[in-house]
Image (cartoon, rainbow, N blue to C red):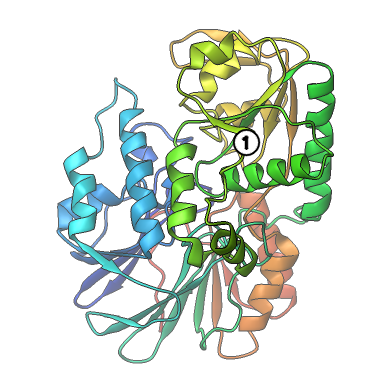
Amino acid sequence: MGAAERVGRSSLEVIRREGSIILDSGVDFGGRGRDKFPLDPQRDVSSLVLTHAHLDHSGYAPAVVSKWGCDFLATPPTVDVSEILLRDFLNLFPEDEPKPFTNQDIGLLKKRERSIRFGMSTQVDGWEVIPFNAGHVLGSAMIYLRSPDGISLLYTGDLNTSNTRTLRGADVNLPEVNYLVIESTYGGDQDVHPSRRKVERKFVEDIRSVIQSGGVTIVPAFALGRAQEVLLTLIHYMESGFLPEVPIFVDGMIREVSKFYTIYWSWLRPELQRRVRESKKGLFDHRAIEEVWSRDEILDLSEPFIVVTTSGMLQGGPVLTYLKHFGTKRGNLIYLTGYQVKGTRGRLLMDGERDIPMPDGSTIRIEADVKFADFSAHADQPNLINFVSKLSESELREVILVHGEPDKMRQLRRKLEKRGIRTYIPRLGEVVQLS
């Protein structure tokens, strides 16, 4: 129902005799009108299962649960964080477009919630549902389904097999999988992530240069996952003395989402669990980090600083204010840190465009430097292949690619088929028979 040969509006309907189980229901920030949202399901929906809280996987969930009165399954962090992100999404929705759901619909998610936890089996109309750590963001899960007659399906959602500052990589010790539906965001032949250490070093070196020259650094970041990785990196290099200690302003939904990293500290990697227990403080309680209470005061500052703010693709939120004020001045830096969907302002900047359209119809000229740091929380092509190859050692019959750009999907399919792994790229709205 979405994410077919495209990144965005992830949604998959598992059609059964009794009805349907929907896996994810997201929005496409590069889409327009109805094309922002997934296709309608073909059967009555008994359950909606979310892999994680990012809006391209969760942004249409309230509409589904409200319409079908179905159960809502997700890990506790995903339930809580998605509520925050969904309310923000609704508040920022374009005034000239009908809203896809209401605040009351968002509240319905918790009323219909069935909490799931990694490795623990849940029954949904006779089907077994088991979430496994996906390593992507706080609470993110791969969804394992086993039908009453024994056919098994693994839907990865967004997948990261490498450790990050906040999370351990995805589980690889999994039950037998017959059909794998896997993301392919970075499935292209050129998609090989540099080491995180190199990425972080280049990131802080560039920011240090801007600080030393008296400039401002704007870091657009996804409120969930990317922002926390960026903040922990900045804190680390400031504490080491490599990066001068200047104010790090945190604006947008990042402030609210980061609180859940303390509430759900037991879901983080062991090193951070120990830090929270020993310090009795939140991960982001640091003297350099300041919440933004008045943007006007920040716009008047003359000394160097860093602002980490939403949205990560520059599609809305406070980043647009900073973009207009600081992005239009030379000597400043805009540091993109995540995947930029086609059709977004972030993608325009990445592709070299400097005359950027704004929501009010005006255009601004970006004079600040623009750089990209590969803080990706997605597996690259080698790691995707390794993940699939490990599953293919058992009873894997077919791999189905979603959530990727067409060229990258075809390149990944070619690599997998060279290894004797049957691979398929479905079209939007296509029904794939599993037997």
Q: Quadrant of the N terminus?
A: bottom left
Residue at position x 64%, y 33% in the image: 288
Please, is residue 241 above or below residue 151 in the view? above
| Residue visible at 63% across and 26% down in the picture | 348
Residue at the disc numbered 1: 287
Residue 239's image quarter? top right
Corner quadrant of residue 86: top left
Left/right placement of residue 316 relative to residue 190 reads: left
Residue 393 x %, y %:
65, 88
Question: Is 186 positioned to the left or the right of 31 in the image?
Answer: right
Q: Is residue 221 above or below residue 97?
A: below
| Residue 119: percent from left, percent from top | 45, 80
Placement of 211 over or under 88, stated as above or below: above
Q: Which quadrant of the structure image shows residue 166?
A: bottom right
Image position of 332 (left or right of 91):
right
Residue 102 seen anywhere in this rendered image of the structure = no
Amino acid residing under circle 1 = Arg
Q: Number of labelled discs? A: 1
Above/below status of 95 relative to 286: above
Secondary structure of residue under mark 1? loop
- Looking at the image, which residue is at 52% across and 50% down? 282
Q: Position of residue 251 (x, y in %)?
A: 50, 29
Residue farthest to the front, as pictured: 279
The one nearer the camera, 263 or 121, is: 263
Q: Residues within 10 Å of mark 1 (few under 14, many from 20)?
A: few
Is residue 230 something that shows in the picture? yes
Q: Quadrant of the C terminus?
A: bottom left
Which x, y percent locates residue 298?
Answer: 57, 15
